[in-house]
Image (cartoon, rainbow, N blue to C red):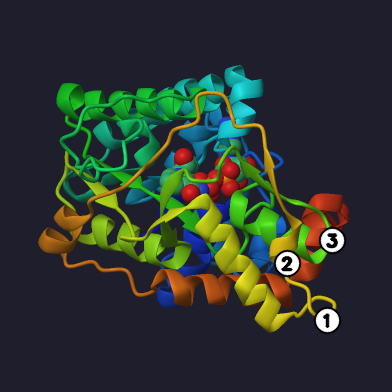
Amino acid sequence: MSIMVTGGAGFIGSNFVLDWLALSNEPVINLDKLTYAGNRGNLATLIHDPRHTLVQGDIGDPLLLASLLEKFRPRCVIHFAAESHVDRSILHPGDFIQTNVVGTFHLLEAVRKYWMSGGDALKAGFRFLHVSTDEVYGSLDNVAPAFRETDRYEPNSPYSASKAASDHLVRSYFHTYGLPVITTHCSNNYGPYQFPEKLIPLIIHNALTGKTLPLYGDGRQVRDWLYVKDHCAALRCVLAAGEVGQTYNIGGWNEKTNIEVVQTLCLILDRLCPPARGKSYAGQIAHIQDRPGHDRRYALDASKLENRLGWKPVETFETGMDKTVRWYLEHRSWVENVTSGSYLRWVEKQYQGK
Ligand code: NAD
């Protein structure tokens, strides 16, 4: 048996693949277009591992999808591949429609044909796990209860609208064709291998390189934060025991304002990597013009997953943030290389002839 992962060279996908192969011997077929956000270097420890097959390709390529499914015959598909950065979706929404909506449609079609033509065992046990976001639910005011799975969709950015559209397509393949799908909605992830355009690695990188620490508007936007390894554990749990046709919220019960996140990072950095005497990295914080249509608050109620499937996050915000800062301090060359491109060229060479 094997599993197929899309977008497994990105932030969450690569953590998922690394954790999966640390815990199991079941091979992984990893289909990734290797956009700017996909990084072979995240999977460098698997270069010579026969259990991992990385295929550079697009989820919007039906012929490639059909041939991979036929060749490897996976028992499930875990769909991470997406354009994922809200700021980029404001500048280039078309890329988000293409990959997140049209690409997910092509993937669903290929998977449906593969699943329908499979034997009874494949038909019964197969799962299509769609990895989605809490952003599809829209924005909350400061007193509203956290999002539940039954809340209606109110996406506000081209990113969240494209993810919402893909969620609806996935749902329709369950109701129309009986494809065994499950959708998860996760809150903001943080941890190793996150591309330094996202808040936490950006702040760490800018602090250490003496740049300003940019905060949108008043910095009081609220997000729920989850350590990426806890997200990966939740996905394994849903894959193993989740009910087909259901949706599950995955959250950390860690609502924080962006300013709290940045101040926490500055305190950890001040302790682990003290700046010049008497200074704090917090002195580099700068408020910048707010993002258009910026959602004020996301909060996620993960009690369905906790009560029905028994998953709980291991890391608190404090322990997860501490681990994350330590990881970036120990892997400063990773950040420098993904931002400069030289690592990419080095890893390309390592993969040649594989
Ligand atoms: P990421 O941007 O780091 O990685 C996305 C990966 O998908 C990259 O490796 C990229 O090369 C690949 N990809 C993009 N377009 C592709 C295409 N057309 N075909 C094949 N591969 C393609 O994203 P991430 O932060 O790891 O997020 C993974 C998934 O989790 C996304 O679906 C995202 O919506 C969802 N999610 C992310 C978060 C978060 O906080 N990062 C929270 C909730 C949900």
Q: Nearer the viewer, mark 2 or mark 3?
A: 2
- Neighbour class for label 1 at 10 Å: few (<14), some, many (≥20)? few
Residue 263 visible here = yes
Question: In which quadrant of the rendered view does residue 217 lie?
Answer: top right
Relative to 319, 241 lies left or right: left
Q: Nearer the viewer, mark 2 or mark 1?
A: 1
Q: Tell me the CA gap for discs 2 and 3.
A: 9 Å
Residue 6 visible here = no
2 and 3 marks in contact (CB < 8 Å): no
Q: Tell me the CA gap for discs 2 and 1.
A: 11 Å
2 and 1 marks in contact (CB < 8 Å): no
In the displayed structure, 189 sits above or below 229; it is above
Relative to 42, 342 lies left or right: right
Label ID, residue 101: none
Kindly identify the amino acid type of the residue bearing the numbered disc 1. Arg
Residue at 65% x, 58% y is 201
Residue labelled with disc 2: 281
Residue closest to the eye, 312 or 288: 288
Q: Nearer the viewer, mark 3 or mark 1?
A: 1
3 and 1 marks in contact (CB < 8 Å): no
- Neighbour class for label 2 at 10 Å: few (<14), some, many (≥20)? many
Residue labelled with disc 1: 277
Which SS class for mark 3?
loop
Residue labelled with disc 3: 210
Residue closest to the eye, 342 or 91: 91
Kindly identify the amino acid type of the residue bearing the numbered disc 3. Gly
Q: Position of residue 28 (x, y in %)?
A: 48, 58
Kindly identify the amino acid type of the residue bearing the numbered disc 2. Tyr
Q: Position of residue 153 (x, y in %)?
A: 28, 26
